[in-house]
Image (cartoon, rainbow, N blue to C red):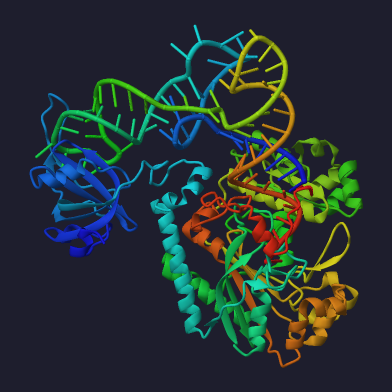
Amino acid sequence: MSAFLSTHTRTHSCGALRAGDAGKKVVLTGWVQSYRDHGERIFIDLRDRDGVTQVVADKSRIAAVHTIADTLRAEWCIGIVGEVRMRGEQLSRGEPGEERKLKKMTNEKIPTGEVEVWIDELEVFSEAETPPFAIEDNIDTNDTVRLKYRYLDLRRPRLQKNLVMRSQITRTTRDYLGTHGFLEIETPFMVKYTPGGARNFLVPSRLNPGNFYALAESPQIFKQLLMVAGYERYFQIVRCFRDEDLRNERQPEFTQIDIEMSFVNEQILQTMMEGLIATLWKDVLGIELKLPLRRMAYAEAMDKYGVDKPDLRLDLTLCDITEPTRTSGYGILESVVSSGGIVKALRVPKDEKLTRAILDGLADFAKSFGAQAAWIKVGDGGAWSGGPAAKNFNEAARQQTNQIAKAQPGDVLIFVANKAKIANTTMGAIRLHIGEKLGLIRKHEWQFMWLTDPPLFEVDDATGEIAAAHHPFTSPRTADEPLLDEAPAKVLARAYDLVLNGVEVGGGSIRIHRSDLQARAFKALRISEDDQRAKFGFLLDAFKYGPPPHGGIAFGLDRLAMLMTGAEFMRDVIAFPKTQRGSDLMTECPTAVSKKQLEELFIQVRPDLPTK
RNA sequence: GGAGCGGUAGUUAAGUUGGUUAUAACGCCGGCCUGUCACGCCGGAGGCCGCGGGUUCAAGUCCCGUCCGCUCCGCCA
């Protein structure tokens, strides 16, 4: 321990001192944010995670302190003892030849700006090399450097603020769920491998040659087993692992607030979760949310917004102009419709900011979704001008389209004709793109909604095969149970997502707890009994012993933290994130391992196989 | 698997039609300065132009390959 800390204990953080503290003897510790050397007087900005305080080394006060202060450099870690003083008024330096004037010395940019600490003792705990980038917000340094020196990046106030808020989120979550009778129970990370769904990271078993664990994609099955075991209310703030391609909002390991409840229906569960969300917003952000949150059926979301996670901060909605297009006389689009495609349109009310350049840019934008976008401008009397569709649509189709879109003179209609999935995805993205370009998204709103009644199964476009949209234990709506056998694609699920500002922040479902219904679900999915047993035998067995009705949800903690902190990148709410290729630039991981290690695990690396 | 953008001093960027010694700002180092808080003033150092190959009398610049980072589609709940 340093001599300093054996005789002194920190009295305040660097963000704590105010005018009322003037005259106090204080002990501060922190890092040198910056220093301004004026010869006989040196000003030092001392920073810790709580803020910045100006401390002053003055030669006429204590010469030895001034001598040490003269050597200080950015990011040295120091401790000081000193006296809090009001900054008051001082004579400014003034320009040469100009008279010096009395000037107020308060720094209004920082909360501690009314005071400063005159140093009586100063100890350097450790020196620092010049950091590769300045430790301050609003620096513009590329991600490679930031990630390599992550421990320095994490010193920046903004990242510290983000991680502090993330900690508040998890603490409030534990408080809320704890007081509502939820038990925090851990489940295994190393689990049985089951093909299908997301790719798994694998962990070789030394004790079982040739066999592997999988890292859990989520604790889904275990939390259901906890319901069977009678724990009634479970939660866990838990890491999940998925070996899929990465994105800004996707890390290979991410954190879920995982929850499961027995003896509930959708309403009971959602109300409980709304309470959690409202408590988080109140305790962490100081914002009162209006409950209950809005609900919207999947079908309506797809129809009006083209996505299952509508951003309701933007009022523009889509409409369907498939019918007028069918007989429009425009051959190319007619053929899209006659082969089963749809035409979705976005009406953009007259807006000077919607320039020709933006409209022309839509072609490339749509291309990245595998679609082509067209646009026309509506003139007086419903006439069209602009792209080729303006000339090729016949009068009747034009009028019918105008009517469906409620188009007014000066409006622009943008549309895409394609297979339903592509048309919706593309127009959904165009809606947001245009909203962003025109500044129509109300950035300061919190627009929550429950997305309800999604399809239970997804039909693969290419193969026509049916797959579980959620997971195979999601319950169908009671009214749709008869459809399970003949028309599974039409069955809707007792599932729900919580959507915030166009981001899916959570999702869950009421589970199947009756084995007869589960058997029919597996049958619809064409999972044979052998397969069922091999993959989920233990769960099916467990369900023979009096399973309670139950359901649950999982929230993406990283996404919630991103939205609540206002972070633009998921990396900014995770202490040690990975890059888009899943590597950690600080530790330089992943790496090859020794031959000996591999042999012990009965693994042979095959560099001869193609990597792509 | 695919599309796009980027990599030049510690950092962020500029670098023309291929042409002399590769610029600038901030940072860094030395000196001066009692009121700064983006302190100021004087002086100085600092480069594998991501890496490999090619074209050329000549490549930061053109071509091919490759590595790394970012954004997006597919994929992923």
Residue at the spot x=63%, y=55% of the render? A593
Please determine whether, in this image, residue A329 is positioned above or below residue A322: above
Can residue A225 be seen here?
Answer: yes
Residue A444 visible somewhere in the drawing: no
In the drawing, does residue A317 fall left or right of residue A46? right
Q: Is residue A388 left or right of residue A34?
A: right
Which of A98/A124 is in front?
Answer: A124
Tell which residue pokes out farthest to the bottom in this image: A546
Q: Residue A234's x, y, as percent?
A: 58, 82
Which residue is pictured at 71% across the width and 54% down the height?
A: A318
Image quarter of the N terminus of chain A: bottom left
Instruction: Where is residue A80? Give x, y as percent.
Output: 20, 54
Left or right, B65 with reference to A46 = right
Query: Which quadrant of the view contains residue A513?
Result: bottom right
The residue lying toward the viewer, choosing from B21 and A465, is: B21
Would you place residue A605 above or below residue A43 in this image?
below
* Badge count: 0
Residue A44 percent coordinates (x, y): 23, 46
Look at 77% across and 36% down and name the residue there. Answer: A387
- Give the percent coordinates (x, y) of residue A119: 15, 51
What is the quadrant of residue A537 in the picture?
A: bottom right
**Residue A10, quarter of picture:** bottom left
Query: What residue is shown at x 86% (from left), y 42% (from top)?
Result: A394
